[in-house]
Image (cartoon, rainbow, N blue to C red):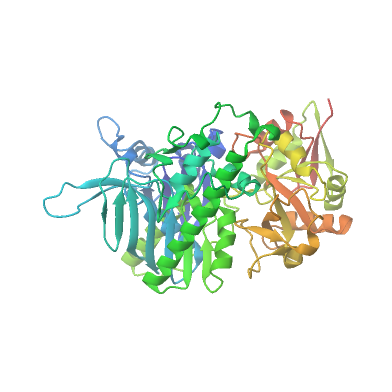
């Protein structure tokens, strides 16, 4: 009989991961089902799991804050109570205080390495109490950066940890630094907030950064390993703020964010501040990688935590450390911890039963609920303003080559924040002002770039992957080959880079065949790819979500490749 583990991450990017005998049965982020961005309570994801398999063990993660929430009478958590209603004998394992450890477990197990150094970089992990010496009061502070030495199957040795709070006294030794500091991700959050984004919308800041440059009036944001507190005010656990009163050069005339939609209103200070925080923080994470190598002797490096989604920084590491084997967890944000917690629970179970577990590398991100039957059902429903017609790859490729935007919906949704051809909007990358066209349709900011999906066999001709053969999870913003600059302007960012997904037929048959058909039509083996959603909304999860997005936007085409159909929104 199989042993089924359900692990959850309560908190922003709430998620549920169901593991059956060490294999991921499905993974879902709560926002995809609830349609509430960053939904932190994964009840609907849990119910999906309960409906799929018997649950033998529930692992509850988080950062510690949820521990205080208990139900009347029994005192148990709502999460535990929900599963117990269906499976009274379920084993419940609490991992409240292991947030960074959950990130490390996800990255390490997903990598397939037998040993590695794990670098975790995020804003604020678990709040931990530390004893700093006899007669001293314990200090409570949040995890910010951690290095682990990982050995399969289940050894995770703390090598270095940076923790911080708003008013924590300074303490340090070889293994730990505690202070009231603005650390790497907190600095990025502070700049993101200054630019009018949410604390966890750092991807927008990353997109603006190439428009800026070094500004001597801004100067260095970091002093040694910490951000300059003359420029930043810490606000744990939420984020940090730019101190505009002490830095008049950074003082904004008003708090309007009109520049998000109007490029004429963006200031040099905004662009340059984004450039500074990107260049300085990626260098600091590079220093952490070097520290990990020096302390462990490892050549295998795994990276997770929110900063792991910084695809510009990830490309920088490949240049700085060409001799290291670097694996970036594609579900680096907090949602990915449910994967790590589930896999470690399986390893623990195996040790108890004297079973030798497999390495458990992650080979796909198509881990959502299989929606094929919903697709078939949707096609059989007659909508008053939608027609359905048989469609081939060549038909859709020609439609795209003629300048049409096409949304794609098929099978399982992608884990993590990247659309990889199952919940994507695609376009012709050759269109000169393609970025502006699609940003307008999606309601995004003018400066945000788009990704490219390329046939794996053609990737090296079009992009400099710095020694990598594939990047199927879209984790790097790479240089476009010099000979191809100008050929794909819609997905080439202002700095000559493009976030790239390589695609093979084995990984995604329908998407591969569509790109191949587009190559035969145009000579370009690449599709402009962005997530199937509108600004401020989660990626679509169900066919109903897809149709809703189609109806309320300027999108006209919805392609269902599994059944060879095209649903067309009629022109107004």
Asked whether residue 324 appears in the rendered view, the answer is yes
Marker count (numbered) = 0
Q: Residue at x 30, y 32 (%)?
A: 71
Q: Residue at x 67, y 57 (%)?
A: 501
In the displayed structure, 269 sits above or below 366; it is: above
Q: Position of residue 86 (x, y in %)?
A: 39, 40
Indicate the quadrant containing the N terminus: top left, top right, bottom left or bottom right. Answer: bottom left
Q: Position of residue 339 (x, y in %)?
A: 46, 54
Quarter assignment of residue 536? top right
Relative side of 73 to 430, left or right: left
The one of 373 and 546 positioned closer to us in this rendering? 546
Q: Position of residue 413 (x, y in %)?
A: 61, 47
Quarter assignment of residue 445? top right
Indicate the quadrant containing the C terminus: top left, top right, bottom left or bottom right. Answer: top right
In the displayed structure, 457 sits above or below 100; it is: below
Q: Position of residue 393 (x, y in %)?
A: 82, 52
Asked whether residue 38 appears in the rendered view, the answer is no
């Amino acid at each position: 009989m199989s042993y089924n583990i359900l692990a959850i991450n309560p908190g922003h990017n709430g998620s549920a991961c169901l593991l059956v005998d060490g294999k991921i049965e499905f993974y879902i982020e709560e926002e995809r089902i609830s349609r509430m961005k960053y939904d932190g309570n994964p009840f609907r994801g849990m119910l999906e799991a309960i409906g799929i398999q018997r649950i033998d063990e529930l692992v509850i993660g988080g950062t510690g804050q949820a521990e205080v929430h208990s139900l009347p009478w029994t005192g148990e958590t709502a999460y535990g109570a929900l599963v117990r209603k269906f499976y009274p004998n379920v084993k419940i394992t609490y991992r409240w205080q292991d947030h960074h450890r959950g990130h490390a477990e996800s990255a390490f197990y997903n990598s397939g390495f037998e040993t590695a150094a794990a670098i975790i970089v995020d804003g604020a992990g678990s709040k931990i109490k530390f004893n700093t010496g006899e007669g001293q009061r314990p200090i409570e502070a949040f995890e910010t950066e951690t290095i682990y030495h990982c050995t399969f199957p289940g050894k995770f040795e703390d090598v270095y940890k940076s923790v911080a709070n708003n008013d924590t006294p300074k303490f340090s030794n070889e293994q730990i630094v505690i202070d009231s500091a603005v650390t790497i991700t907190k600095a990025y959050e502070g700049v993101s907030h200054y630019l009018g984004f949410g604390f966890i919308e750092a991807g927008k800041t990353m997109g603006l950064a190439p428009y800026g440059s070094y500004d001597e009036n801004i100067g260095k944001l970091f002093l040694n390993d910490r951000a300059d507190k003359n420029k930043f005010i810490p606000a744990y656990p939420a984020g940090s703020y730019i101190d505009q009163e002490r830095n008049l050069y950074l003082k904004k005339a008003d708090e309007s964010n009109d520049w998000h939609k109007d490029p004429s209103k963006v200031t040099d200070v905004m662009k340059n501040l984004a450039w500074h925080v990107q260049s300085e923080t990626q260098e600091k994470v590079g220093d952490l990688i070097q520290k990990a190598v020096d302390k462990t002797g490892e050549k295998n490096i795994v990276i997770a935590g929110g900063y792991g989604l910084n695809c510009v920084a990830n490309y920088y590491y490949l240049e700085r450390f060409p001799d290291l084997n670097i694996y970036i967890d594609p579900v680096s944000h907090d949602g990915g911890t449910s994967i790590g917690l589930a896999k470690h629970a399986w390893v623990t179970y195996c040790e108890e039963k004297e079973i030798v577990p497999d390495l458990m590398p992650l080979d796909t991100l198509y881990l959502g609920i299989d929606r094929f039957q919903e697709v078939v059902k949707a096609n059989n429903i007659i909508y008053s303003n939608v027609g359905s017609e048989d469609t081939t790859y060549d038909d859709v490729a020609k439609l795209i080559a003629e300048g049409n935007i096409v949304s794609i919906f098929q099978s399982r949704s992608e884990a993590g924040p990247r659309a990889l051809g199952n919940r994507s909007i695609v376009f012709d990358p050759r269109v000169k002002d393609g970025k502006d066209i699609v940003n307008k349709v999606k309601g995004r900011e003018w400066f945000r770039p788009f990704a490219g999906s390329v046939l794996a066999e053609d990737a090296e001709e079009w992009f400099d992957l710095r020694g990598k053969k594939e990047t199927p999870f879209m984790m790097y913003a790479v240089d476009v080959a010099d000979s191809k600059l100008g050929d794909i302007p819609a997905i080439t960012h202002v700095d000559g880079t493009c976030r790239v997904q390589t695609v093979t037929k084995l990984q995604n048959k329908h998407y591969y065949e569509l790109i191949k058909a587009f190559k035969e039509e145009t000579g370009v083996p690449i599709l402009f790819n962005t997530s199937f959603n509108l600004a401020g909304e989660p990626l679509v999860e169900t066919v109903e979500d897809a149709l809703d997005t189609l109806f309320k936007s300027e999108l006209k085409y919805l392609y269902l490749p599994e059944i060879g159909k095209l649903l067309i929104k009629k022109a107004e």
